[in-house]
Image (tube, rainbow, N blue to C red):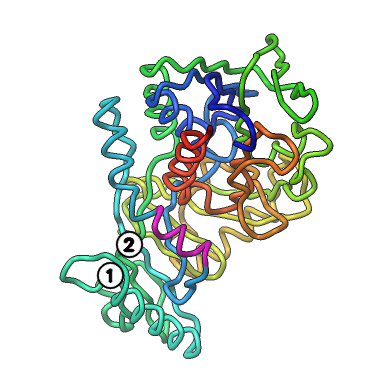
Amino acid sequence: MKGIKLPKNVTIIGAGIIGLSAAWKLAEQGFDVTVLEKGKCGSGSTTASLGALVPYNASREDEMPTLQRNSLWSYPKFINDLHAFTGIEVGYKKAGRLQIIQNEHQKNKLQQDADIANEKWPHNTNKVQKILSVDDLKILEPELSSTPFGAMYCQATAYFEPKRMVAALRSACMKQGVDIRENSPAVKIMEEDGVINAVHSATGLVTCDAVIMAAGAWSKKLLPTSSSIKEYVAPLKGQALEISTPKRLINHMVRGLGVYLIQVDDKTLLLGGTKEKNAGFDETLTEEAEGFLLTRAEQLVPAIAECKVVKQWAGFRPYSEQGAPFIGWDNDFKNLYHATGHAGIGLCLTPYTCQKILEDFKSCK
């Protein structure tokens, strides 16, 4: 932290997966942590997500895709540590993903990705990625519609159940003595001469030595006017569906035609998700979104046409105009730390973000 001594009292704004993870790990290291949450823990984009952990394509080897994949590789330890401390299972499953191939060009590109992944990604003796023929795909997933180009199988794809993850992280925080204040939205960050000294919340004033902004898409509303990132964070609306199925239709995550499907149990299939950049914080559930998702899903798995939609919901990903999340100290406020703007990879980047927060705070002089 620039010219500020090691903080003792840390206030985290936002109790999503990143805010709760940071609170748990900071408290574990002896920091006094207070978490302010406008609703219930995880009630923002965390539980609006489907819990998918999908690595960037192997051919993308620039900084952010590499960080994302390394973060994903550390997830098993992150979840094992959480389970060992709380005893709560989060439904983590390395189910694998099928990327439906639409044309020959895409097939060639995915074959290149598979070659790179099999060379560089951690895996056992089996290939971590491979192209499946039409016949192999039909044997693996008989309910999928016929495709002339087959699919790419990625063994490294996993998912967890967001509500169970939130419950586990909340439990970990409580066991470490974190003061979690639900239904206590931050109203204003109080600062003097570029140093934040308190956060005014709906339930009172919280004094602190440092603030971590982990409020996701709502971060922009709370940041001081002169914050260096205020104009670069915006909501990206997404809608998703829960579908009741008479039996298990798919055994792997399926991605294609701009949607993805996860069968979480024998009678529940999740379908996501739209990307609505200019919707703001409009929570309206639209027939257009439902129609788009169902039409695409039925093209992939025709049996979905006979199934019933039991739930539709919307959430808001924290979209970053710079194309990458903001993780680090603010340029203008000495003790304001950003952990926001993760867009669709917040779940994937949680272990990395949490570790970076911990390292940055412990390195303060």
* Main SS class of the magenta portion in the image: helix
Q: Position of residue 119 (x, y in %)?
A: 29, 77
* Residue 2 as seen in the image, left or right of residue 66: right
Q: Earlier in the sequence, mark 1 or mark 2?
A: 1
Where is mark 2, residue-wise?
156
**What residue range appears in magenta?**
63-71
Report the amino acid beneath label 2.
Answer: Ala
**Crowding at label 1, few (<14), some or many (≥20) Cα neighbours within 10 Å?**
many
Question: Per the image, is 65 magenta?
Answer: yes
**Crowding at label 2, few (<14), some or many (≥20) Cα neighbours within 10 Å?**
many
Q: Which residue is more in the foreground, 311 or 126?
A: 126
Q: Position of residue 135 (x, y in %)?
A: 28, 82
Q: Which mark is residue 128?
A: 1
Above-or-below relation of 277 to 203: below
Report the amino acid beneath label 1.
Answer: Val
Q: Residue at x 38, y 77 (%)?
A: 151
Residue that sits furthest to the right in the current view: 225
Q: Which residue is more in the foreground, 121 or 93?
A: 121
Dots 1 and 2: beta carbons under 8 Å? yes
Above-or-below relation of 308 to 148: above
